[in-house]
Every structure is written in structure tokens, then in C-alpha cells.
């Protein structure tokens, strides 16, 4: 198979091994001049259409009606927790994600 054919095949079949790990799509770029479009896109992510696409791709939908259709594909989660278990975003953001916080420390292996 030629290199060109391999590239075409890898686009048609995502399970084929690729020679790089870079994602080919930008899912959301939020710029000052695109706020309205970005907000519309975020709203779209929660529509039944988008949630169905996510479920078909193997992601657990958050829309209850879509989950009712695809729920048997996803295991029951025992001891499910939410951001509220960490004090909400106002507490979790600085504790886990600010510069030098827990996430950075984990990446550095500390």
C-alpha cells in the first residue's frame, strides 16, 4: 500500500495506526471576536443531536432522553462524584488547576 493510500485509509478508519498523535480538529477556539459563535456552539453541545453523536462515538451523554436510548452501552457508575464534592469550581480551580497547584505537581511527578 502506498503512503498516500495509508493516509487516506487512516482518515477513513480511525483505528489504523498513525505516525503522529496530533488531533486534526480544533473543537473550540474562543476569541474575543467569536464569543457569540462560541456560546452558540457550547449550547449546541447539549442538544439531542450533539448528545446522540457523542453517545454513538462512545461518550456518555448528559441528556436524559439520549441516555435512555444509549444507556445500556455504559456501565453503572458506583460512587459517582461531581465538582461539588470538591467544594465547587470556586474552590477546586485554585486547589487543583492554578499554576503550581495539584495538577501541575502531578505532571511534574511530585
Image (cartoon, helix red, strand yellow):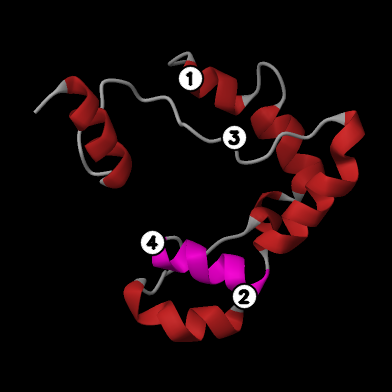
Label 3 neighbourhood size at 10 Å, few (<14), some (14-19), many (20+)?
A: few
Label 1 neighbourhood size at 10 Å, few (<14), some (14-19), many (20+)?
A: few
Q: What is the CA distance from the residue labelled 2 to the residue labelled 4?
A: 15 Å
Magenta: main secondary structure equals: helix
Give SS at disc 4: loop
Q: Which residue is mark 4?
A: 58
Check whether the beta carbons of the residues at disc 2 and disc 3 lie within 8 A of each other: no
Label 2 neighbourhood size at 10 Å, few (<14), some (14-19), many (20+)?
A: some
The image quadrant of residue 35 is: top right
Residue 72 relative to residue 105: left or right: left
Using the image as rendered, state which of residue 84 and residue 63 is in the foreground.
63
Q: Which residue is mark 1?
A: 107
Point out the frontmost of discs 2 and 4.
Answer: 2
Give SS at disc 1: helix
Q: What is the CA distance from the residue labelled 3 to the residue labelled 1?
A: 24 Å
Point out the frontmost of discs 2 and 1.
Answer: 2
Residue 95 relative to residue 1: left or right: right
Q: Which residue is mark 3?
A: 26
Looking at marks 2 and 1 on the same chain, the residue that comes earlier in the sequence is marked by 2
Q: In this rendering, is residue 100 above or below 87?
A: above
Point out the frontmost of discs 4 and 3.
Answer: 3
The image quadrant of residue 28 is: top right
Looking at marks 2 and 4 on the same chain, the residue that comes earlier in the sequence is marked by 2
Q: What is the CA distance from the residue labelled 2 to the residue labelled 3?
A: 22 Å
Q: Position of residue 65 (x, y in %)?
A: 57, 85
Q: In the rendered structure, which segment of residues is drawn in magenta?
A: 47-58
Amino acid at each position: 500500500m502506498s503512503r498516500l493510500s495509508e493516509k487516506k485509509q487512516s482518515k477513513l478508519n480511525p483505528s489504523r495506526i498513525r505516525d503522529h498523535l496530533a488531533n486534526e480538529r480544533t473543537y473550540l477556539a474562543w476569541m474575543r471576536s467569536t464569543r457569540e459563535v462560541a456560546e452558540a456552539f457550547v449550547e449546541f453541545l447539549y442538544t439531542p443531536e450533539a448528545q446522540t453523536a457523542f453517545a454513538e462515538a462512545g461518550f456518555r451523554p448528559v441528556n436524559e432522553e439520549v441516555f435512555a436510548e444509549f444507556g445500556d452501552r455504559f456501565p453503572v457508575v458506583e460512587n459517582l462524584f461531581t465538582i461539588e464534592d470538591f467544594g465547587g469550581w470556586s474552590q477546586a480551580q485554585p486547589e487543583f488547576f492554578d499554576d503550581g497547584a495539584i495538577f501541575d505537581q502531578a505532571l511534574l511527578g511530585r
